[in-house]
């Protein structure tokens, strides 16, 4: 059974997105810079350090020291976290009903044929256990 993760508040998830995007561990100032550039966050360094401390305490990230600098890296992979959040959402809001999920997603809107074909392909593969 896969490890269950605690749901991340939005601010912590924003930080994790930046960390997940990087191939290498990131220092605090680079995380702050990317949060500003990519997500429009205007946080100060102490706000970010508080979020990083919480993420580390929860087991989402860790760091390595290089001199006085801390370089952060993920301990949890993004795909696993998203999968768990999606399954939780599906169960909680749709009681594992695909009909309910699709009805809420379409909201009475028209779906183009390409999207219908893609969804049909996904459903066929899932029915075969290939997805």
Image: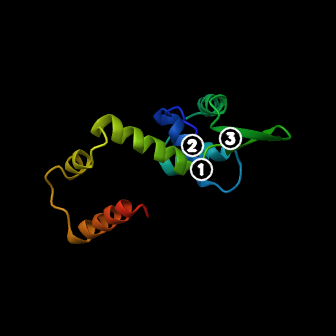
Residue where numbered disc 2 is placed: 16
Q: Which mark is residue 20?
A: 1
**Quarter location, residue 91:** top left
Distance between the Cα atoms at labels 1 and 3?
14 Å
Q: Residue at x 57, y 43 (%)?
A: 16
Residue where numbered disc 3 is placed: 28
Instruction: Check the picture and name the quadrant holding the C terminus.
Output: bottom left
Q: Earlier in the sequence, mark 3 or mark 2?
A: 2
Dot 2, how many residues are within 10 Å of its Cα: few (below 14), some (14-19), or many (20+)?
many
Query: Do callouts 1 and 2 mark residues in contact (Cβ within 8 Å)?
Result: yes
Q: Residue at x 68, y 41 (%)?
A: 28
Query: Do callouts 3 and 2 mark residues in contact (Cβ within 8 Å)?
Result: no
Examine the rendered structure and indicate whether residue 14 appears above or below residue 111. above
Residue 42 visible within the image = no
Q: Residue at x 53, y 51 (%)?
A: 79
Q: Earlier in the sequence, mark 1 or mark 3?
A: 1
Q: Is residue 15 left or right of residue 70?
A: left
Q: Is residue 37 left or right of residue 73?
A: left
């Amino acid at each position: 059974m896969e490890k269950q993760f605690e749901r991340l508040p939005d601010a912590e998830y924003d930080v994790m997105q930046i960390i997940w995007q990087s191939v290498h561990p990131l220092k605090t100032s680079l995380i702050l810079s990317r949060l500003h550039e990519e997500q429009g966050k205007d946080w100060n360094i102490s706000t970010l350090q508080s979020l990083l401390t919480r993420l580390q305490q929860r087991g989402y990230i860790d760091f390595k020291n290089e001199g006085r600098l801390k370089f952060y890296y993920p301990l949890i992979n993004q795909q696993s976290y998203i999968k768990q959040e999606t399954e939780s959402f599906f169960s909680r809001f749709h009681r594992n009903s695909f009909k309910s999920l699709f009805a809420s997603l379409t909201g009475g809107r028209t779906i183009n044929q390409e999207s219908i074909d893609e969804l049909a392909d996904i459903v066929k593969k899932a029915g075969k256990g290939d997805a």
